[in-house]
Amino acid sequence: MPLKGQEEDPLLLDRHGGFFMGDRPERSDMENEWNTRTTLVHGGTRRSQYNELSEAIYLTQSFVYDSAEQAEARFIESGPDEFIYARYGNPTVAMFEDRIAAIEGTEAAFATASGMAAVSGALTSMLRAGDHVVAARALFGSCLYILEDVLTRFGVEVTFVDGTDLDEWESAVRKGTKAVFFETIANPTLDVIDIAAVAEIAHSVGATVVVDNVFATPVFSRAVQQGADVVIYSATKHIDGQGRALGGVILGSREYIEKTVQPYMKHTGGSMSPFTAWIMLKGLETMDLRVRAQAASALAITDAVQGHAKLSRALFPGHPSHPQAELVTAQMGKGGTVIALDLAGGQAAAFRFLNALRIVLISNNLGDAKSIATHPATTTHQRLSEEQRTTLGITPGLVRFSVGIEDTDDLVADVMHALDAV
Ligand SMILES: Cc1ncc(COP(=O)(O)O)c(C=O)c1O
């Protein structure tokens, strides 16, 4: 039922996705035509009867029904914007889900408590004992744990391949392969996987293509257009981008999100909190500006360190020197916000470099406004065996450098000074 005043201007309500008394209007034609930066600011917005400017935080775990009959009906089937319990859904969380789905170009999204809740939820909800999965070997340590330790414990067979080698994908998939999984840009070696080519191989046997798109970022990503069926983000990274909260999101078709992911997530408890969703909505507003500035600085820093005597490699997917630069340009235009610097002097040199940085912080997040440097071999990828690290190219001298939004010249000066100190 519209509130007083609102019925006088239905267009205004449509345009802003007005939210009143559980009656969510369809997204207007205008909203569908918005460009990315407009959608990042306005997409999915619901307003209460108070017409607040900033999105409201509906800090409630439950919702009240007008009658016992209404409660019964809602448990049988809830319409859009009809809520039951925050583990199932919440208006602030729904705003975040609709906004990120509009950016990614998927029909639906489910927001999760962390990036890892998204990775485990996306896979576990669709798999059962006896299923076969093919995954790229170069994965973030926790992703590897899900595939190697958790899924196999429940009777899922997992085959690992070199994600950049299409012949390996071709020979690993078989009739009955249920899913393929890879990071579109691998953490921390920055290998880029050809989404369209792997999707074609996977789809030829009917497998679902699930990608962790964190390093590609929702700003530059074209994963769904290129054939991914399910896209996952750790919202902790570029979406928040300001080091405040853990979060994640699973994006895909309405059928997959509503029939497969939602029942699993709502009963196992990995949903995003309303307060986190509000932080992520605020993060999305500035994400495009931040990420483009970060990518530009990453390019400038990579340029500045090319051929430096203290480095055996300086890799940035957006730089022409990256071995897969052509694929990066075709697949996502830019190369994200993370650089890999390999110190020729091994771990001791990497530690000296890290300890000499004055602006860039030693930490293990990425995609943040603050520049952050990490030594993967002794931190994020410590649980891998030395042999696994060698296979993946995680050398003792490798430093992962997530470029922030500080002044580009200051960052270049900081890196050059730290290299001099090695
Ligand atoms: C590629 C990738 N996937 C998933 C995650 C997990 O995200 P979260 O820390 O939000 O659980 C990370 C975290 O670093 C990551 O780098």
Image (cartoon, grey):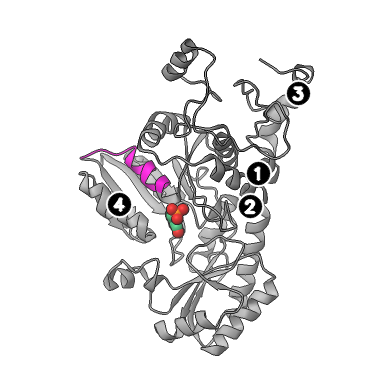
Look at the numbered discs 1 and 4 and tell me whether their residues touch, using CB distance below 8 Å. no
Residue at the image position 62 percent from the left and 47 percent from the top: 284
The residue that label 2 is drawn on is 287
Residue at the image position 59 percent from the left and 21 percent from the top: 22
* Residue 25, visible in the rendered structure: yes
Which three-letter amino acid code belongs to the residue tagged 4? Leu
Residue 358 image position (x, y, % from top left): 60, 79
Q: Earlier in the sequence, mark 1 or mark 2?
A: 1
The residue that label 1 is drawn on is 40
Residue at the image position 58 percent from the left and 47 percent from the top: 280
* Residue 165, visible in the rendered structure: no
Residue 385 image position (x, y, % from top left): 27, 69
**Spatial distance from mark 4 to mark 3, Cα to Cα?**
48 Å
Q: Earlier in the sequence, mark 1 or mark 3?
A: 3
Out of 26 and 82, give the one closest to the viewer.
82
- The image quadrant of residue 420 is bottom right
**Spatial distance from mark 1 to mark 2, Cα to Cα?**
8 Å
Up/down of 270 relative to 259, above or below: below
Q: Earlier in the sequence, mark 1 or mark 4?
A: 1
The residue that label 4 is drawn on is 147
Up/down of 285 relative to 300, above or below: above
**From which residue to which does the magenta span run?**
117-129
Helix, strand or loop status at disc 2? helix
Dominant secondary structure of the residues highlighted in magenta in the image: helix
Look at the numbered discs 1 and 2 and tell me whether their residues touch, using CB distance below 8 Å. yes
| Mark number, residue 17 | none
Helix, strand or loop status at disc 4? helix
Residue at the image position 39 percent from the left and 69 percent from the top: 379
Q: Earlier in the sequence, mark 4 or mark 3?
A: 3
Q: Any atom of ligand 1 within 8 Å of the CB at mark 2? A: no
Instruction: Name the quarter where the N terminus is drawn.
Output: top right
